[in-house]
Amino acid sequence: MARGISPSEAVVLERLELERPSLVTTDGLAGLLREAGIGTLPRVFAARLRRKGWLLATPQPGVWEFAPAAVAGPYSSADPLLGFRSFLARHPGAACGLTFQAAAWAHGLADRAPARPEVAAVDAGTARRLPSVLNGSVFVPVLGYVQARDVPALRPESVIVHMCAKPMSVRSWASTLEWLPDLAAETSGDDILLEVASRPASVWARAGYLLQGLRPDIAARIAEGRALPARTWFGSRNPVLRHDASWQVADALLPFDPRTLEAVS
């Protein structure tokens, strides 16, 4: 597909083709225009490039996906993390990272990314600013973030603790069986204990309950680390699916019995 360009557009597109950014922001485009001595307003210039298919819309205003000449037309890369990347481009200081299945996929432990990648933000304000193509929740990781697929993501230990701190935030517990065993296999007992150390005893109980089949070694350390509550609910207080006397957990949520999962360590 031919995409005609003017001389001024050619100057900017030459830079973009050399640098090959996946995303272009208003500020970044403004810098290119200043360097080229082009007085056109960035938003006007962006609109022209959008009409000709060089810039593609993202869920974040003021951020566009660059469609280089090599793709022969205005075609998106279909990156499942485009919504998150565009948010980070607009809010580079935002403290948030992939969690749940999205994090497992980013770490190479899940075969596919979810349709709405899950993002854990450190506060409700940041979670509210996330675009609707992302599934946001609030969780503050003790272990911080790591880079996975070039975006921030929770470590495997933090993902598991997030699941136990906010079990109702997991959209499909049934699908976790596709990646939870591999995630648990990558989990360090020392880091799990660091991640749960400052959290309520109910999170300890859920973590031990969830990991007792997959990682009995870690579950044993959790059991030794802190006295557990008389009762901890896993999920909302619906009819109980099972009760675990060892962890004093009333499970009203999980579609599987974690005690029956095969150990991965």
Image (cartoon, rainbow, N blue to C red):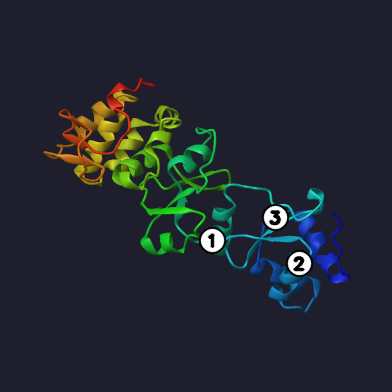
Q: Are dots 2 and 3 in contact, CB under 8 Å?
A: no
Instruction: From the image, tell me which residue sits under label 3.
Output: 21
Please give left or right for residue 209 compared with residue 138 in the image. left
**Residue identifier under label 1:** 92
C-alpha distance separating marks 2 and 3: 19 Å
Residue 100 x, y percent position in the rendering: 43, 42
| Helix, strand or loop under label 3 | loop
Q: Give the residue number, with chain letter if any, for mark 2.
A: 51
- What residue is rendered at 38% in x and 42% in y? 158
Residue flagged by tag 3: what amino acid is it?
Answer: Pro
Can you tell which of label 2 and label 3 is closer to the viewer?
2
Q: Quadrant of the N terminus?
A: bottom right
Q: Observer-nearest residue: 22 or 146? A: 22
Q: Amino acid at mark 1?
A: Pro
Residue type at the position of mark 2: Arg
Q: Is residue 85 left or right of residue 156?
A: right
Secondary structure beneath disc 2?
helix
Residue drawn at x 58%, y 43% as measured from the top left: 149
